[in-house]
Amino acid sequence: MNLIKSRFRILPILSAFFLLIFFVNPTVASVSPITKPATVPVLHTSSVSPVVTLLDPSFNPSLVGGSPFCYSGSLGTIICYPPNFLKTAYNFPSTAGRHGLDGTGSTIVIVDAFGSPTIQSDLNTYDAAFGLPSTTVTILCGPTWTGATTDICPLNTIGDIATVGATAAGQACGGVGGVEGWVEETTLDVTMAHSLAPGAHIVLLVANDCFDTSLYGAELTIVNQPQYKGSIMTQSFGEPDDLVTCTALDPTNSYCVSYDPTLLNLPNLVFQTAANNHWTVIASSGDEGANEDAGVLGTLELTPSFPATSPLVLAAGGTEGSPYGGTYGAEPGPGGTFTCAARATCDTGLVVINGGANGCGTAVRPGEPTSCYPTGYGGESTWNEVTNFALTGGYIGYTSGGGMSTLYSVPSYQQIVPHKFTTLLGNTVKATGRMTPDVSFNSAVYGGVMAYIGFLGRWAVFGGTSAASPAWAGIMALANQANGRPLGFVNPTIYTMGLLGTILGPLSSFHDITQGNNAVCSGLCGEDGFLAGRGYDLTTGWGTPNVSYFITTIVLLNALTGK
């Protein structure tokens, strides 16, 4: 019997279905209660239940002005960021000039189930809209994942989505909707990594389905291929840490009653091989906060997400702009618009912008001019949007994952951080296992990133820690280029940098996130969670990057240690 249902980390904001349901009456009185799943959870698979918002059909960033104010009929306006806005806020180095960094020489391997039949055209559309250099994605599929002529990808046409979704494997992965979620995730992962490191080689590693054996089996083949030595891997999927080795649940499907520790052998082999071959491996920390079992078992114990909990993986958590929405506040609702006047300084939360010569506003038709441009960093707090009822409909899954593993003990590099944490409900929790996340990146839905979904023919805004993992892959590609060779396993160095940052203050490699919590309902379901605070915490790790400082520091420390 298949038992573990793992959660995929994607939130491309609100599907047309959800738009009709949620925004007839955009005010929801409370968070929906945590409920038990209607069927027995399918363990050892990765599934997706995307909450997707599509922008208005007329929206096209190559024709329509207005960024960072995207037109959404149901929300009126949603704050949305093109790549240059994120790069300005996080102080990315220039890609131009003698010392420019664009990731040249690095390879980013993006791991997804099923893949996407439109990924190359999706990326081409994205690049044309935002003036990015084009690139060709190398797509590797089974059974060899070497590019052999005998390898066959699961999805080759848009029609294959429905066909594969109806198969036994497709049904185990959530049916047609689940397969569509992986297609959307593929688009987010590829566009995010490429937008931040446009010179890096992008490889899409496509697993045949969402079973753990398929995902980690595909990974094992590529980490052993000599031509990919020193690459960067990004994984935007996961499952509750306490269920990874579970083989049977109790009759009420509330907790595990038997375990098989050997189920860790395959992923452990993948990550150890990757470390030996100088890979940097990254995973998103999850979207159900400190309570990853909530969406699988309907229970509220403190549980982080695997594979982010592996000590050999860099765990990427999430943040949102602070103040939320900046000076604009929440979404204005149908017909509502935002503006930033000419030459005015305007705060959108994460990114501070200037109105430029003409200003900008919510664009509702092609050809509307804009002159707004990003000027710097605003502020951030822990990603937890569950109380934004107009956006979420009161449902969970909008919160930065983090906590302590029951699979792995505290690694040596985490001995320098506190081992006791006060929770949202005032409890004291002692760290007895590997802690996550390590670092974070913007994951907000309201203040998310744009991407083009080719199989739907629409632009959308994406959020979730799905965005954080490929973003950090792009950052590491720039760092590898600056270093002149792959940095490989970086977790120990990052913890040294985090500790230094508590001394360096404004010269730190990280923005220290000190506000917010990661309880899956923000405490409204009676659940516990962890609090943000000074230095390292279990909501955002060391925080989000000041990328230029991060690269300078990690290269310097690498040279000093002779790695």
Image (spheres, rainbow, N blue to C red):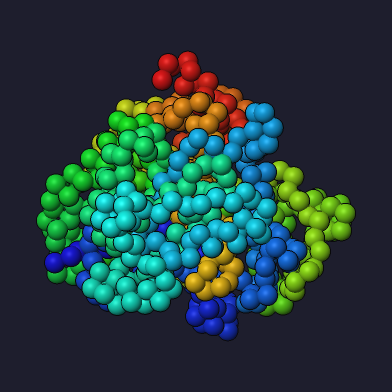
Q: Is residue 309 above or below residue 289?
A: above
Q: Quadrant of residue 255?
A: bottom left
Q: Position of residue 7 (x, y in %)?
A: 35, 60
Q: Position of residue 200 (x, y in %)?
A: 52, 42
Q: Is residue 259 above or below residue 32?
A: above
Q: Quadrant of the N terminus?
A: bottom left
Q: How many numbered callouts? A: 0
Q: Nearer the viewer, residue 72 or 123?
A: 123
User: Can the viewer see residue 125?
Assistant: yes
Q: Is residue 258 left or right of residue 17?
A: left
Hey, which residue is sitting farthest front in the picture?
Answer: 149
Q: Nearer the viewer, residue 485 or 294?
A: 485
Q: Nearer the viewer, residue 92 or 351?
A: 92
Q: Position of residue 539 (x, y in %)?
A: 45, 46
Q: Position of residue 199 (x, y in %)?
A: 56, 42
Q: Quadrant of residue 420?
A: top left
User: Can the viewer see residue 422?
Assistant: no
Residue shown at 32% from the left, 73% from the top: 164
Residue shown at 46% from the left, 21% from the top: 558
Residue shown at 43% from the left, 73% from the top: 158
Residue shown at 36% from the left, 70% from the top: 178
Q: Quadrant of the C terminus?
A: top left
Q: Is residue 294 left or right of residue 256?
A: right
Q: Quadrant of residue 313?
A: top left
